[in-house]
Image: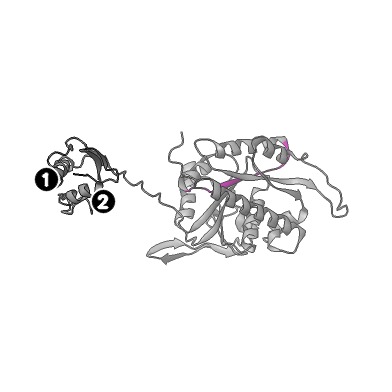
Amino acid sequence: MTLYPQLILDALVHVRYPGTGKDIVSSGMVQNNIHIDGNKVTFSLIFEKQNDPFAKSVVKAAEQAILTYVGEDIDIKGNIGVEMKEAPKPKPVRVLPGVKNIIAVFSGKGGVGKSTVSSNLAISLAALGYKVGLLDADIHGPSMPKMFGVEDARPVMDEIDGKQVLIPIEKYGVKLLSIGFFVDPNNALVWRGSMASNALKQLIVDAHWGELDFFVMDLPPGTGDIQLTLVQTLGITGAIAVTTPQDVALADARKGINMFMGEKVNVPVLGLVENMAWFTPAELPENKYYIFGKEGGKRLAEELHVPLLAQIPLVQSIREQGDAGRPVAADENTITASIFKELALKVVERIDYRNQNFEATHIVEIIK
């Protein structure tokens, strides 16, 4: 008699798995690895879970079915292997399921214009037609309410899908939340690290951010509790470093970049922004004065192999309009607005490249 795989399958139809009462062929338990060598038949059965209590009895029943329905001379005893299905890996729970990309804007030290870059980047992205949210994560020095001219605004709670959530303030096309909306701006905020971290988590988790293309987070300077809280709460798409050209700022920027790119955190750095790169007086528009040093940020980007996203000059209107509650990017037809528009386009390009070539960033479970 000539043996072929279908004969074996026809015999195995008579074997039923006790757990369901269905035959093992239609249940997909017979692996597609039936091998016939003369009268010797080998194949594998696959079971849903480890240590299945019916595995041994099903194997014996399969052996007997082949001997009964194919032939008593078939060499099958001990030739049926047992495999187990891999348990499906649990899908990570996304804290912000409607958010496509999360950008952390950071600096190694204060005073380098990180919040100016964050606010103008968010507004420029919105002007390009994207849905944008901005979180002022600088718990101890929140500046976004002033920069957006909404210092007197107070976010309200609303019930959405049966849950009480905080509704962000919207201005210049950007959804905005800051701890500055909830504290007295004239008094220092004296909180321990855990209190600040918990407050920040609430602004992220208990707010209705909705569908966003980009969620920009303006981080406090340094590499402390807030930064670690964020990487343990969110899978950050990428980080942007902001520095000025002088050595003291570059040294701190290097530490921040190394923290994000380090093995324990492993967040891609999208690039570096060199702020206050030079000063050009209005009466001498062709002149560049390198007050804080020349191209220090560019050299650092080359050294650490990260893209230089922008060199932003020291311009009086950037400071003045930020203080006045209307960042320069809100006035689209100006030279300074075009600088931040170019930055936004570079960021979009870098995120597209990052998403196409690298896996999604995982939440950092434990940092020691």
Residue 186: give x, y in percent of width and height.
60, 53
Counting from the top left corner in percent of width and height, residue 180 is at 56, 55
Q: How many marks?
A: 2
Q: Is residue 58 left or right of residue 152?
A: left
Extreme front residue here? 1
Q: Which mark is residue 215?
A: none
Residue visible at 31% across and 45% down in the picture: 87
Secondary structure under badge 1? Answer: helix
The answer to whether residue 313 is magenta is no
Direction from residue 164 to residue 40 in the image, left or right: left
Amino acid found under the numbered disc labelled 2:
Gly
Residue 315 locus on image (x, y percent): 77, 52
Q: Quadrant of residue 160?
A: bottom left
User: Residue at left 72%, top 37%?
Assistant: 299
Q: Quadrant of residue 247?
A: top right
Magenta stretch: give its range. 234-246
Name the residue at 60% across, 43% down: 221
Label placed on residue 28:
2
Q: Which residue is mark 1?
A: 68
Q: Does the stretch in magenta take in 236?
A: yes
**Considering depth in this image, is 140 or 45 the residue closer to the camera?**
45
Work out whether mark 2 precedes mark 1 in sequence or the reverse, and give the earlier one. 2
Who is closer to the viewer here, 270 or 172? 270
How far from the left and from the top, in percent, is residue 269?
Answer: 59, 43
* Local SS, label 2: loop
